[in-house]
Image: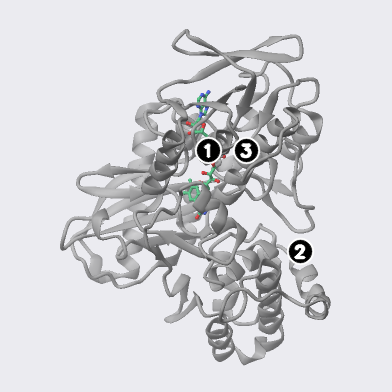
Amino acid sequence: MPKVIIIGGGVSGLSAGIYSRINGLDAVICEKHFKAGGNLTGWDRSGYHIDNCIHWLTGTNPSTDTYRMWEQLGALGDVQIYQGESLFTCERDGQTLSMSRNIDKFRDDMLKLSPADEKEINSFIKAVKAIQGIAGIAGENHNEKISAGQLVSAAPHLLKLYRLTTGELAARFEHPLIKDFFTAFFTDKFMALMLAFVCAHYCGDNGGVPVGGSTAMAQRMADRFESLGGDMRLCKEASKINFDGRHASSVTFTDGTTIDADYVIVTTDPAMTFGKLLNIKMPKSLAKQYKKSEYMRFSSIQSAFSCDTDTLPFKGDYALEIPPEYRLRLGAQNVMVREFSHEKDFSPSGKSLIQAMAFCGEDKAKKFIELRENREEYAKRKRRLSEIISSLIEEKFPELKNKLNCLDVWTPATYRRYVGSEMGSWMSFALSSNAPPLRKKNLIPGLDNVIMASQWLMSPGGLPIAADGGRIAVETIMKKERKKFKM
Ligand SMILES: Cc1cc2nc3c(=O)[nH]c(=O)nc-3n(C[C@H](O)[C@H](O)[C@H](O)COP(=O)(O)OP(=O)(O)OC[C@H]3O[C@@H](n4cnc5c(N)ncnc54)[C@H](O)[C@@H]3O)c2cc1C
Protein backbone atom coordinates (compact mmCIF):
# COMPACT_ATOMS: atom_id res chain seq x y z
CA MET A 1 0.00 0.00 0.00
CA PRO A 2 1.65 3.32 -1.05
CA LYS A 3 2.41 5.59 1.89
CA VAL A 4 1.29 9.23 1.74
CA ILE A 5 2.78 11.79 4.11
CA ILE A 6 0.48 14.80 4.43
CA ILE A 7 2.11 17.97 5.73
CA GLY A 8 -0.46 20.04 7.63
CA GLY A 9 -3.58 18.91 9.48
CA GLY A 10 -5.91 21.75 8.42
CA VAL A 11 -9.01 21.07 6.34
CA SER A 12 -6.95 20.41 3.17
CA GLY A 13 -4.78 17.90 5.04
CA LEU A 14 -7.68 16.23 6.84
CA SER A 15 -9.56 15.87 3.56
CA ALA A 16 -6.46 14.47 1.83
CA GLY A 17 -6.03 12.02 4.73
CA ILE A 18 -9.66 10.84 4.69
CA TYR A 19 -9.77 10.38 0.89
CA SER A 20 -6.40 8.58 1.05
CA ARG A 21 -7.84 6.09 3.49
CA ILE A 22 -11.09 5.70 1.50
CA ASN A 23 -8.83 4.83 -1.46
CA GLY A 24 -6.76 2.32 0.48
CA LEU A 25 -3.60 4.42 0.82
CA ASP A 26 -1.48 4.40 3.95
CA ALA A 27 -1.90 7.98 5.23
CA VAL A 28 0.06 9.90 7.86
CA ILE A 29 -1.00 13.48 8.68
CA CYS A 30 1.80 15.51 10.27
CA GLU A 31 0.53 18.65 12.00
CA LYS A 32 2.83 21.07 13.82
CA HIS A 33 0.27 21.94 16.53
CA PHE A 34 -1.16 19.86 19.34
CA LYS A 35 -4.49 19.65 17.54
CA ALA A 36 -5.70 19.34 13.96
CA GLY A 37 -7.87 21.90 12.14
CA GLY A 38 -5.50 24.73 11.16
CA ASN A 39 -7.66 27.85 10.68
CA LEU A 40 -10.73 25.78 11.47
CA THR A 41 -10.25 26.17 15.19
CA GLY A 42 -11.25 27.95 18.36
CA TRP A 43 -9.91 28.31 21.88
CA ASP A 44 -11.07 28.79 25.47
CA ARG A 45 -10.50 31.92 27.56
CA SER A 46 -11.77 32.45 31.12
CA GLY A 47 -14.81 30.19 30.74
CA TYR A 48 -15.70 31.40 27.20
CA HIS A 49 -15.10 29.69 23.85
CA ILE A 50 -13.74 31.86 21.05
CA ASP A 51 -14.60 30.63 17.54
CA ASN A 52 -11.96 31.45 14.96
CA CYS A 53 -13.52 30.42 11.74
CA ILE A 54 -16.96 29.53 10.42
CA HIS A 55 -19.18 32.49 9.55
CA TRP A 56 -20.85 30.50 6.81
CA LEU A 57 -20.13 27.03 5.55
CA THR A 58 -20.91 26.56 1.87
CA GLY A 59 -22.43 23.11 1.49
CA THR A 60 -24.92 22.98 4.35
CA ASN A 61 -27.81 22.63 1.91
CA PRO A 62 -28.44 18.86 1.52
CA SER A 63 -29.21 19.18 -2.20
CA THR A 64 -25.63 20.22 -3.05
CA ASP A 65 -22.56 18.16 -3.98
CA THR A 66 -20.55 20.06 -1.36
CA TYR A 67 -22.93 18.81 1.34
CA ARG A 68 -22.22 15.24 0.21
CA MET A 69 -18.47 15.94 0.41
CA TRP A 70 -18.81 17.28 3.98
CA GLU A 71 -20.79 14.17 4.89
CA GLN A 72 -18.07 11.91 3.47
CA LEU A 73 -15.52 13.84 5.47
CA GLY A 74 -17.56 13.39 8.66
CA ALA A 75 -17.58 17.19 9.01
CA LEU A 76 -21.27 17.63 9.75
CA GLY A 77 -21.89 14.59 11.95
CA ASP A 78 -25.44 14.64 13.22
CA VAL A 79 -25.33 18.14 14.65
CA GLN A 80 -27.91 20.77 13.85
CA ILE A 81 -27.06 23.40 11.23
CA TYR A 82 -27.69 26.91 12.46
CA GLN A 83 -28.67 29.50 9.90
CA GLY A 84 -29.54 32.90 11.32
CA GLU A 85 -32.18 35.17 9.80
CA SER A 86 -29.53 37.48 8.34
CA LEU A 87 -25.86 37.21 7.40
CA PHE A 88 -25.05 40.74 8.53
CA THR A 89 -26.64 44.05 9.33
CA CYS A 90 -25.42 47.52 8.53
CA GLU A 91 -26.66 50.69 10.18
CA ARG A 92 -26.31 54.36 9.29
CA ASP A 93 -28.09 57.33 10.82
CA GLY A 94 -30.62 55.18 12.62
CA GLN A 95 -31.64 53.09 9.59
CA THR A 96 -30.64 49.44 9.25
CA LEU A 97 -30.32 47.01 6.36
CA SER A 98 -29.73 43.26 6.73
CA MET A 99 -28.77 40.61 4.19
CA SER A 100 -31.82 38.51 4.99
CA ARG A 101 -31.93 34.80 4.50
CA ASN A 102 -35.05 35.39 2.40
CA ILE A 103 -33.76 36.94 -0.83
CA ASP A 104 -37.11 38.56 -1.67
CA LYS A 105 -37.22 40.21 1.75
CA PHE A 106 -33.66 41.48 1.18
CA ARG A 107 -34.75 43.01 -2.15
CA ASP A 108 -37.96 44.49 -0.67
CA ASP A 109 -36.04 46.01 2.26
CA MET A 110 -33.65 47.73 -0.15
CA LEU A 111 -36.53 48.95 -2.33
CA LYS A 112 -38.35 50.33 0.71
CA LEU A 113 -35.22 52.22 1.72
CA SER A 114 -34.54 53.58 -1.73
CA PRO A 115 -37.07 53.32 -4.59
CA ALA A 116 -34.68 55.45 -6.66
CA ASP A 117 -32.20 52.53 -6.66
CA GLU A 118 -34.71 50.05 -8.10
CA LYS A 119 -32.75 49.35 -11.29
CA GLU A 120 -29.46 48.55 -9.49
CA ILE A 121 -31.25 46.58 -6.75
CA ASN A 122 -33.03 44.38 -9.31
CA SER A 123 -29.83 43.88 -11.28
CA PHE A 124 -27.99 42.63 -8.16
CA ILE A 125 -30.85 40.35 -7.12
CA LYS A 126 -31.11 38.94 -10.66
CA ALA A 127 -27.42 38.04 -10.57
CA VAL A 128 -27.80 36.42 -7.12
CA LYS A 129 -30.76 34.34 -8.29
CA ALA A 130 -28.85 33.27 -11.40
CA ILE A 131 -25.95 32.06 -9.23
CA GLN A 132 -28.43 30.17 -7.06
CA GLY A 133 -29.82 28.51 -10.18
CA ILE A 134 -26.35 27.56 -11.38
CA ALA A 135 -25.53 26.05 -7.97
CA GLY A 136 -28.92 24.31 -7.76
CA ILE A 137 -29.92 26.04 -4.55
CA ALA A 138 -32.74 28.23 -5.80
CA GLY A 139 -36.44 27.97 -5.17
CA GLU A 140 -38.44 26.63 -2.28
CA ASN A 141 -37.08 23.13 -2.48
CA HIS A 142 -33.57 24.42 -3.09
CA ASN A 143 -32.84 22.20 -6.03
CA GLU A 144 -33.95 24.17 -9.04
CA LYS A 145 -31.34 24.60 -11.75
CA ILE A 146 -31.40 27.61 -14.02
CA SER A 147 -32.63 27.22 -17.61
CA ALA A 148 -30.46 28.25 -20.57
CA GLY A 149 -32.85 31.16 -21.28
CA GLN A 150 -32.63 32.42 -17.68
CA LEU A 151 -28.85 32.18 -17.80
CA VAL A 152 -28.67 34.23 -21.00
CA SER A 153 -30.92 36.92 -19.50
CA ALA A 154 -28.84 37.03 -16.28
CA ALA A 155 -25.45 37.06 -18.05
CA PRO A 156 -25.18 40.87 -18.39
CA HIS A 157 -25.90 41.27 -14.63
CA LEU A 158 -23.26 38.66 -13.74
CA LEU A 159 -20.75 40.22 -16.11
CA LYS A 160 -21.35 43.65 -14.65
CA LEU A 161 -20.53 42.39 -11.14
CA TYR A 162 -17.41 40.66 -12.50
CA ARG A 163 -16.22 43.99 -13.87
CA LEU A 164 -16.89 46.00 -10.71
CA THR A 165 -15.26 46.13 -7.29
CA THR A 166 -17.58 46.26 -4.28
CA GLY A 167 -16.67 49.96 -4.00
CA GLU A 168 -17.64 50.62 -7.63
CA LEU A 169 -20.89 48.71 -7.18
CA ALA A 170 -21.68 50.72 -4.03
CA ALA A 171 -21.10 53.96 -5.94
CA ARG A 172 -23.93 53.07 -8.34
CA PHE A 173 -26.51 53.35 -5.56
CA GLU A 174 -27.92 56.63 -4.34
CA HIS A 175 -28.90 55.70 -0.80
CA PRO A 176 -26.01 56.15 1.67
CA LEU A 177 -26.95 53.05 3.69
CA ILE A 178 -27.06 50.81 0.60
CA LYS A 179 -23.72 52.27 -0.49
CA ASP A 180 -22.22 51.41 2.92
CA PHE A 181 -23.89 48.01 2.97
CA PHE A 182 -22.09 46.81 -0.16
CA THR A 183 -18.65 47.65 1.25
CA ALA A 184 -19.29 46.82 4.91
CA PHE A 185 -18.45 43.14 4.73
CA PHE A 186 -15.73 42.79 2.09
CA THR A 187 -14.31 46.34 2.04
CA ASP A 188 -14.45 48.33 -1.23
CA LYS A 189 -11.70 46.41 -3.08
CA PHE A 190 -13.10 42.97 -3.82
CA MET A 191 -14.86 41.80 -6.94
CA ALA A 192 -18.58 42.57 -6.54
CA LEU A 193 -19.40 39.15 -7.98
CA MET A 194 -17.88 37.51 -4.87
CA LEU A 195 -20.42 39.30 -2.67
CA ALA A 196 -23.20 38.09 -4.97
CA PHE A 197 -21.87 34.52 -4.58
CA VAL A 198 -21.90 34.80 -0.79
CA CYS A 199 -25.44 36.22 -0.90
CA ALA A 200 -26.58 33.46 -3.29
CA HIS A 201 -25.33 30.67 -1.04
CA TYR A 202 -26.50 32.27 2.19
CA CYS A 203 -29.98 33.03 0.84
CA GLY A 204 -30.11 29.52 -0.69
CA ASP A 205 -29.79 28.03 2.82
CA ASN A 206 -26.34 26.86 1.80
CA GLY A 207 -24.29 28.89 4.27
CA GLY A 208 -25.16 27.75 7.77
CA VAL A 209 -22.93 26.93 10.73
CA PRO A 210 -22.82 23.44 12.24
CA VAL A 211 -23.65 23.86 15.92
CA GLY A 212 -20.52 23.60 18.07
CA GLY A 213 -18.65 25.74 15.54
CA SER A 214 -15.18 25.40 14.14
CA THR A 215 -13.33 23.36 16.78
CA ALA A 216 -16.06 20.74 16.89
CA MET A 217 -16.12 20.40 13.09
CA ALA A 218 -12.33 20.00 12.95
CA GLN A 219 -12.48 17.34 15.66
CA ARG A 220 -15.17 15.40 13.77
CA MET A 221 -12.96 15.37 10.67
CA ALA A 222 -9.91 14.27 12.68
CA ASP A 223 -12.03 11.50 14.29
CA ARG A 224 -13.22 10.39 10.85
CA PHE A 225 -9.61 10.15 9.63
CA GLU A 226 -8.56 8.07 12.63
CA SER A 227 -11.67 5.88 12.46
CA LEU A 228 -10.61 4.95 8.91
CA GLY A 229 -7.23 3.82 10.22
CA GLY A 230 -5.33 7.05 9.44
CA ASP A 231 -2.21 7.90 11.42
CA MET A 232 -2.39 11.38 13.00
CA ARG A 233 0.91 12.77 14.28
CA LEU A 234 0.48 15.97 16.26
CA CYS A 235 3.29 18.36 17.35
CA LYS A 236 5.10 17.13 14.25
CA GLU A 237 6.50 20.02 12.23
CA ALA A 238 7.99 19.20 8.84
CA SER A 239 11.27 20.99 8.09
CA LYS A 240 12.40 19.43 4.81
CA ILE A 241 11.27 17.15 2.01
CA ASN A 242 14.13 14.87 0.92
CA PHE A 243 14.69 13.76 -2.69
CA ASP A 244 16.17 11.00 -4.70
CA GLY A 245 16.37 12.79 -8.06
CA ARG A 246 12.81 13.84 -9.03
CA HIS A 247 11.32 11.56 -6.42
CA ALA A 248 10.52 12.68 -2.84
CA SER A 249 11.71 9.82 -0.66
CA SER A 250 11.05 11.11 2.88
CA VAL A 251 10.18 14.06 5.09
CA THR A 252 12.35 15.32 7.93
CA PHE A 253 10.81 16.97 11.00
CA THR A 254 12.02 19.57 13.50
CA ASP A 255 12.23 16.84 16.18
CA GLY A 256 15.03 15.25 14.12
CA THR A 257 13.00 12.28 12.87
CA THR A 258 12.47 11.30 9.23
CA ILE A 259 9.51 9.37 7.75
CA ASP A 260 9.75 7.57 4.39
CA ALA A 261 7.12 8.40 1.79
CA ASP A 262 5.84 7.19 -1.57
CA TYR A 263 3.90 10.44 -2.01
CA VAL A 264 4.02 13.77 -0.17
CA ILE A 265 0.98 16.06 -0.05
CA VAL A 266 1.84 19.62 0.98
CA THR A 267 -0.96 21.81 2.33
CA THR A 268 1.04 24.83 3.52
CA ASP A 269 0.99 28.33 1.97
CA PRO A 270 3.16 28.02 -1.18
CA ALA A 271 4.98 31.23 -0.12
CA MET A 272 6.27 29.25 2.88
CA THR A 273 6.70 25.94 1.05
CA PHE A 274 8.97 26.81 -1.85
CA GLY A 275 12.55 27.67 -0.90
CA LYS A 276 11.86 26.31 2.61
CA LEU A 277 10.22 22.89 2.92
CA LEU A 278 11.00 22.35 -0.74
CA ASN A 279 14.40 23.50 -1.87
CA ILE A 280 13.19 24.74 -5.25
CA LYS A 281 11.60 27.90 -6.60
CA MET A 282 7.83 28.33 -6.75
CA PRO A 283 6.43 27.37 -10.20
CA LYS A 284 6.22 30.52 -12.33
CA SER A 285 2.48 30.26 -12.93
CA LEU A 286 1.80 30.33 -9.18
CA ALA A 287 4.49 32.90 -8.36
CA LYS A 288 2.77 35.33 -10.76
CA GLN A 289 -0.29 35.50 -8.51
CA TYR A 290 1.74 36.87 -5.62
CA LYS A 291 2.78 39.85 -7.75
CA LYS A 292 -0.46 40.81 -9.52
CA SER A 293 -2.41 43.65 -7.96
CA GLU A 294 -5.79 42.14 -8.84
CA TYR A 295 -5.07 39.12 -6.62
CA MET A 296 -4.92 40.29 -3.00
CA ARG A 297 -3.94 38.63 0.21
CA PHE A 298 -5.72 39.76 3.35
CA SER A 299 -5.97 39.00 7.03
CA SER A 300 -7.74 40.53 10.01
CA ILE A 301 -7.44 42.11 13.41
CA GLN A 302 -9.81 40.52 15.89
CA SER A 303 -10.82 40.70 19.49
CA ALA A 304 -13.22 38.87 21.76
CA PHE A 305 -15.13 40.29 24.73
CA SER A 306 -17.09 38.70 27.51
CA CYS A 307 -20.29 40.58 28.20
CA ASP A 308 -22.07 40.77 31.56
CA THR A 309 -25.54 40.19 30.15
CA ASP A 310 -27.22 37.54 28.09
CA THR A 311 -29.44 40.07 26.31
CA LEU A 312 -27.55 41.78 23.50
CA PRO A 313 -28.92 44.72 21.51
CA PHE A 314 -28.07 43.17 18.12
CA LYS A 315 -28.39 39.79 16.42
CA GLY A 316 -25.89 37.95 14.20
CA ASP A 317 -23.12 40.03 12.59
CA TYR A 318 -23.36 43.81 12.78
CA ALA A 319 -21.16 46.28 10.88
CA LEU A 320 -19.91 49.20 12.97
CA GLU A 321 -18.48 52.15 11.09
CA ILE A 322 -15.02 53.07 12.34
CA PRO A 323 -14.69 56.85 12.91
CA PRO A 324 -12.08 58.44 10.56
CA GLU A 325 -9.61 59.11 13.41
CA TYR A 326 -9.25 55.33 14.03
CA ARG A 327 -9.32 54.11 10.42
CA LEU A 328 -5.60 54.38 9.88
CA ARG A 329 -4.80 52.52 13.09
CA LEU A 330 -7.26 49.72 12.32
CA GLY A 331 -6.64 49.83 8.57
CA ALA A 332 -10.37 49.39 7.88
CA GLN A 333 -13.60 51.35 7.59
CA ASN A 334 -15.80 48.87 9.40
CA VAL A 335 -15.50 46.44 12.21
CA MET A 336 -17.90 43.52 12.13
CA VAL A 337 -19.16 42.52 15.57
CA ARG A 338 -20.67 39.11 16.05
CA GLU A 339 -22.72 37.48 18.80
CA PHE A 340 -23.14 33.78 19.58
CA SER A 341 -26.56 33.45 21.24
CA HIS A 342 -27.08 30.26 19.16
CA GLU A 343 -24.13 28.61 20.95
CA LYS A 344 -25.22 28.01 24.54
CA ASP A 345 -21.86 26.47 25.51
CA PHE A 346 -19.68 29.37 24.33
CA SER A 347 -20.36 31.54 27.40
CA PRO A 348 -21.37 30.96 31.04
CA SER A 349 -25.04 31.25 31.90
CA GLY A 350 -26.28 34.85 32.13
CA LYS A 351 -23.32 36.13 30.06
CA SER A 352 -22.53 36.42 26.39
CA LEU A 353 -19.64 36.55 23.96
CA ILE A 354 -18.96 39.24 21.35
CA GLN A 355 -16.23 38.91 18.73
CA ALA A 356 -15.08 41.78 16.53
CA MET A 357 -13.21 41.59 13.23
CA ALA A 358 -11.68 44.20 10.92
CA PHE A 359 -10.18 43.07 7.61
CA CYS A 360 -6.69 44.27 6.81
CA GLY A 361 -4.67 44.20 3.62
CA GLU A 362 -1.09 43.05 3.03
CA ASP A 363 0.61 46.27 4.10
CA LYS A 364 -1.14 46.40 7.43
CA ALA A 365 -0.61 42.65 7.94
CA LYS A 366 3.11 43.04 7.27
CA LYS A 367 3.33 45.79 9.90
CA PHE A 368 1.75 43.58 12.56
CA ILE A 369 4.10 40.73 11.70
CA GLU A 370 7.10 43.07 12.05
CA LEU A 371 5.71 44.64 15.22
CA ARG A 372 5.50 41.25 16.92
CA GLU A 373 9.32 41.16 16.91
CA ASN A 374 9.05 43.70 19.72
CA ARG A 375 6.78 41.83 22.11
CA GLU A 376 6.26 44.76 24.49
CA GLU A 377 5.16 47.16 21.74
CA TYR A 378 3.02 44.47 20.16
CA ALA A 379 1.23 43.79 23.46
CA LYS A 380 0.70 47.54 23.91
CA ARG A 381 -0.79 47.84 20.40
CA LYS A 382 -3.13 44.93 21.04
CA ARG A 383 -4.33 46.50 24.30
CA ARG A 384 -4.97 49.79 22.49
CA LEU A 385 -6.88 48.02 19.72
CA SER A 386 -9.15 46.27 22.19
CA GLU A 387 -9.81 49.62 23.94
CA ILE A 388 -10.73 51.25 20.62
CA ILE A 389 -13.01 48.38 19.59
CA SER A 390 -14.76 48.16 22.96
CA SER A 391 -15.34 51.91 22.97
CA LEU A 392 -16.84 51.65 19.44
CA ILE A 393 -19.20 48.91 20.63
CA GLU A 394 -20.17 50.88 23.74
CA GLU A 395 -20.77 54.03 21.73
CA LYS A 396 -23.10 52.20 19.36
CA PHE A 397 -24.80 50.21 22.13
CA PRO A 398 -24.70 52.35 25.31
CA GLU A 399 -26.55 49.60 27.21
CA LEU A 400 -23.30 47.59 27.06
CA LYS A 401 -21.25 50.30 28.82
CA ASN A 402 -18.99 48.85 31.54
CA LYS A 403 -20.20 45.34 30.68
CA LEU A 404 -17.42 44.36 28.26
CA ASN A 405 -14.16 42.66 29.25
CA CYS A 406 -11.48 41.85 26.73
CA LEU A 407 -10.78 38.11 26.51
CA ASP A 408 -8.25 38.15 23.67
CA VAL A 409 -6.87 40.13 20.72
CA TRP A 410 -5.34 38.46 17.68
CA THR A 411 -3.77 39.85 14.54
CA PRO A 412 -2.17 38.77 11.22
CA ALA A 413 0.95 37.98 13.28
CA THR A 414 -1.09 35.40 15.20
CA TYR A 415 -2.12 33.64 11.97
CA ARG A 416 1.43 33.80 10.64
CA ARG A 417 2.62 32.07 13.80
CA TYR A 418 -0.27 29.63 14.07
CA VAL A 419 -0.87 28.32 10.53
CA GLY A 420 2.38 29.62 9.02
CA SER A 421 0.91 31.65 6.15
CA GLU A 422 3.34 34.31 4.98
CA MET A 423 1.08 37.37 5.49
CA GLY A 424 -1.12 35.81 8.14
CA SER A 425 -3.71 35.29 5.39
CA TRP A 426 -6.41 32.83 6.18
CA MET A 427 -8.07 32.62 2.77
CA SER A 428 -6.54 32.34 -0.66
CA PHE A 429 -6.16 35.33 -3.01
CA ALA A 430 -9.17 37.63 -3.03
CA LEU A 431 -10.06 38.79 -6.51
CA SER A 432 -10.47 42.36 -7.55
CA SER A 433 -12.62 43.30 -10.57
CA ASN A 434 -11.81 41.73 -13.95
CA ALA A 435 -9.51 39.12 -12.40
CA PRO A 436 -9.85 35.73 -14.10
CA PRO A 437 -10.64 33.00 -11.55
CA LEU A 438 -7.52 31.31 -10.24
CA ARG A 439 -7.16 27.56 -10.65
CA LYS A 440 -3.64 26.16 -10.52
CA LYS A 441 -2.28 22.66 -11.11
CA ASN A 442 -1.47 20.64 -8.02
CA LEU A 443 1.62 18.95 -9.48
CA ILE A 444 5.01 20.65 -9.32
CA PRO A 445 7.03 20.70 -12.55
CA GLY A 446 10.16 18.57 -12.21
CA LEU A 447 8.87 16.52 -9.25
CA ASP A 448 7.14 13.15 -9.58
CA ASN A 449 5.34 12.59 -6.34
CA VAL A 450 4.87 15.88 -4.45
CA ILE A 451 1.31 17.17 -4.71
CA MET A 452 -0.08 20.45 -3.47
CA ALA A 453 -3.46 20.39 -1.77
CA SER A 454 -4.25 23.84 -0.75
CA GLN A 455 -6.77 26.64 -0.82
CA TRP A 456 -3.99 28.67 -2.44
CA LEU A 457 -4.52 26.88 -5.76
CA MET A 458 -8.02 28.24 -6.23
CA SER A 459 -9.48 31.62 -5.35
CA PRO A 460 -10.99 32.73 -3.07
CA GLY A 461 -10.12 29.74 -0.87
CA GLY A 462 -12.23 28.88 2.15
CA LEU A 463 -13.27 25.59 3.70
CA PRO A 464 -14.92 23.86 0.68
CA ILE A 465 -12.00 24.73 -1.58
CA ALA A 466 -9.51 23.47 1.01
CA ALA A 467 -11.48 20.21 1.33
CA ASP A 468 -11.76 19.88 -2.43
CA GLY A 469 -8.00 20.41 -2.76
CA GLY A 470 -7.40 17.42 -0.48
CA ARG A 471 -9.75 15.27 -2.54
CA ILE A 472 -8.17 16.30 -5.86
CA ALA A 473 -4.67 15.55 -4.51
CA VAL A 474 -5.74 11.97 -3.78
CA GLU A 475 -7.36 11.72 -7.20
CA THR A 476 -3.98 12.72 -8.68
CA ILE A 477 -2.24 9.98 -6.72
CA MET A 478 -4.78 7.38 -7.82
CA LYS A 479 -4.26 8.43 -11.44
CA LYS A 480 -0.51 7.94 -11.01
CA GLU A 481 -1.20 4.54 -9.43
CA ARG A 482 -3.48 3.75 -12.43
CA LYS A 483 -6.32 2.95 -10.06
CA LYS A 484 -9.90 4.17 -9.98
CA PHE A 485 -10.57 6.98 -7.49
CA LYS A 486 -13.25 6.07 -4.94
CA MET A 487 -15.51 8.73 -3.41
C1 LIG B 1 -11.31 34.51 10.92
C2 LIG B 1 -11.57 33.48 9.87
C3 LIG B 1 -12.83 33.36 9.33
C4 LIG B 1 -13.07 32.42 8.31
N1 LIG B 1 -14.33 32.25 7.89
C5 LIG B 1 -14.60 31.31 6.97
C6 LIG B 1 -15.94 31.01 6.62
O1 LIG B 1 -16.89 31.57 7.16
N2 LIG B 1 -16.15 30.08 5.63
C7 LIG B 1 -15.12 29.43 5.01
O2 LIG B 1 -15.38 28.61 4.13
N3 LIG B 1 -13.85 29.67 5.36
C8 LIG B 1 -13.55 30.58 6.33
N4 LIG B 1 -12.26 30.81 6.72
C9 LIG B 1 -11.17 30.22 5.91
C10 LIG B 1 -10.84 28.78 6.25
O3 LIG B 1 -10.60 28.67 7.60
C11 LIG B 1 -9.61 28.36 5.44
O4 LIG B 1 -9.88 28.57 4.08
C12 LIG B 1 -9.26 26.88 5.61
O5 LIG B 1 -9.31 26.52 6.96
C13 LIG B 1 -7.89 26.60 5.01
O6 LIG B 1 -7.53 25.27 5.27
P1 LIG B 1 -6.12 24.68 4.82
O7 LIG B 1 -6.01 23.33 5.36
O8 LIG B 1 -5.93 24.88 3.36
O9 LIG B 1 -5.03 25.66 5.49
P2 LIG B 1 -4.69 25.91 7.01
O10 LIG B 1 -5.91 26.03 7.82
O11 LIG B 1 -3.76 27.08 6.98
O12 LIG B 1 -3.91 24.62 7.47
C14 LIG B 1 -2.55 24.42 7.28
C15 LIG B 1 -2.07 23.53 8.41
O13 LIG B 1 -0.71 23.23 8.20
C16 LIG B 1 -0.04 23.27 9.44
N5 LIG B 1 1.37 23.49 9.16
C17 LIG B 1 1.96 24.60 8.65
N6 LIG B 1 3.28 24.39 8.47
C18 LIG B 1 3.52 23.12 8.86
C19 LIG B 1 4.70 22.31 8.91
N7 LIG B 1 5.88 22.78 8.51
N8 LIG B 1 4.58 21.04 9.38
C20 LIG B 1 3.39 20.54 9.79
N9 LIG B 1 2.26 21.28 9.78
C21 LIG B 1 2.32 22.54 9.31
C22 LIG B 1 -0.72 24.41 10.17
O14 LIG B 1 -0.51 24.35 11.55
C23 LIG B 1 -2.18 24.19 9.77
O15 LIG B 1 -2.82 23.31 10.66
C24 LIG B 1 -12.00 31.65 7.79
C25 LIG B 1 -10.74 31.75 8.36
C26 LIG B 1 -10.53 32.63 9.41
C27 LIG B 1 -9.21 32.67 10.09
Quadrant of residue 79 within the rendered picture: bottom left
Is there CB contact under 8 Å for labels 2 and 3?
no
105 shown above or below 409: below
Badge 2 amino acid: Tyr
Towards the viewer: 403 or 430: 430
Q: Which mark is residue 454?
A: 3
x, y percent for residue 174: 65, 82
Q: Is mark 3 within 8 Å of ligand 1?
A: yes
Dot 1 or dot 2, earlier in sequence: 1
Towards the viewer: 393 or 255: 255
x, y percent for residue 229: 45, 31
Kindly identify which residue carries mark 1: 18
Kindly identify which residue carries mark 2: 162
Q: Nearer the viewer, mark 1 or mark 3?
A: 1
Badge 3 amino acid: Ser
Q: CA distance from mark 2 to mark 3?
A: 24 Å
Residue 455 in view in this figure: no
Q: Secondary structure at mark 3?
A: loop
Q: CA distance from mark 1 to mark 2?
A: 35 Å
Is there CB contact under 8 Å for labels 1 and 3?
no
What residue sits 66% from the left and 86% below the top? 117
